Amino acid sequence: MEIDKYESLVRIVDENDNILMPLDFLDIAKKTNYYSKMTLIILQNSFKALIYTKKEISVNISFFDIENNETRRNILNILNENKEFCSKITFELLEEDDINDFKLIKDFIKEVKQYGIKIAIDDFGKGYSNFERLIKYQPDILKLDGLLIKNIEHDDFSFSIVEMLVTFAQKQNIKVIAEYVENENIFNILKNLGVDYSQGFYFGKAEPLKL
């Protein structure tokens, strides 16, 4: 019932002041070196933002970032330069199927956790999430896929999946965040199921940090 953390998000503002969402440009950016540059800028800006808030901040990190040797080294360098603030940062790992080196991902998670970074798996429950992968990564947090949450009021199937995932997470001592919480009724359903944190337009929309 209070703000616990913020999430760093990236947007592009075009020449007509239209705001472009990540779906409009991330796939294109992945084909260039801009994707990795964006990741590093977001991470650096997140550490700068911690000067202005006592809350924690989450940052999206993709397996594409981790498997890129240069990007991975740069991420670790940024953590090394900001050791005193790392415990206030959570890395949200995006659920993706095209992972080539699971050991590399696991080693990266182990290394960043030594700095105090917390690990969340984002969009969990989307498609065919791999529970074996979940156990290997040993995350601190699960973020449930927004489609499950959007439909939970009227779809028994979504309700049952969320209920099952919450029970599983509780047994593994993993915190659960629900995304796309858009009204009070959804929030109350999730609270009654035991979801730890909620995020969505019911609480506030993405906006620039007010410095």
Image (cartoon, rainbow, N blue to C red):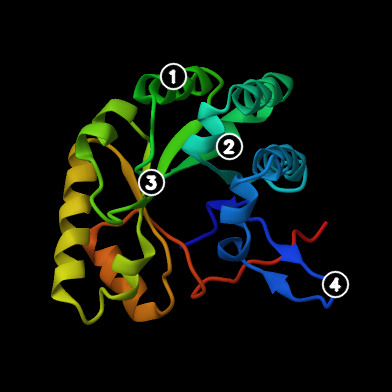
Q: Please state the horizontal and vertical placement of residue 18, each as a whole percent of the image.
A: 75, 76
Identify which amino acid the numbered label 4 is placed on: Glu
Q: Please state the horizontal and vertical placement of residue 176, each as a whole percent of the image.
A: 33, 50
Q: Which of 74 and 90 is in front in this view?
A: 74
Separation of disc 2 and disc 1 at Cα? 15 Å
Identify which amino acid the numbered label 1 is placed on: Lys
* Picture mark count: 4
Which of the labelled discs sits on residue 89, or is there none? 2
Which residue does the numbered mark 3 point to in the structure image?
Answer: 95
**Relative to 85, residue 202 above or below:** below
> Circles 4 and 2: CB distance less than 8 Å?
no
Which residue does the numbered mark 4 point to in the structure image?
Answer: 15
At horizontal 74% and vertical 45% (from top left) the residue drawn is 49
**Relative to 78, residue 32 above or below:** below
Q: Quadrant of residue 204?
A: bottom right
Separation of disc 2 and disc 3 at Cα? 19 Å
Q: Which of 62 and 124 is in front in this view?
A: 62
Which one is earlier in the sequence, the residue at label 3 or at label 4? 4
Secondary structure of the residue carrying tag 2 is strand
Which residue does the numbered mark 1 point to in the structure image?
Answer: 110
Identify which amino acid the numbered label 3 is placed on: Glu
Secondary structure of the residue carrying tag 1 is helix
Which of the labelled discs sits on residue 24, or is there none? none
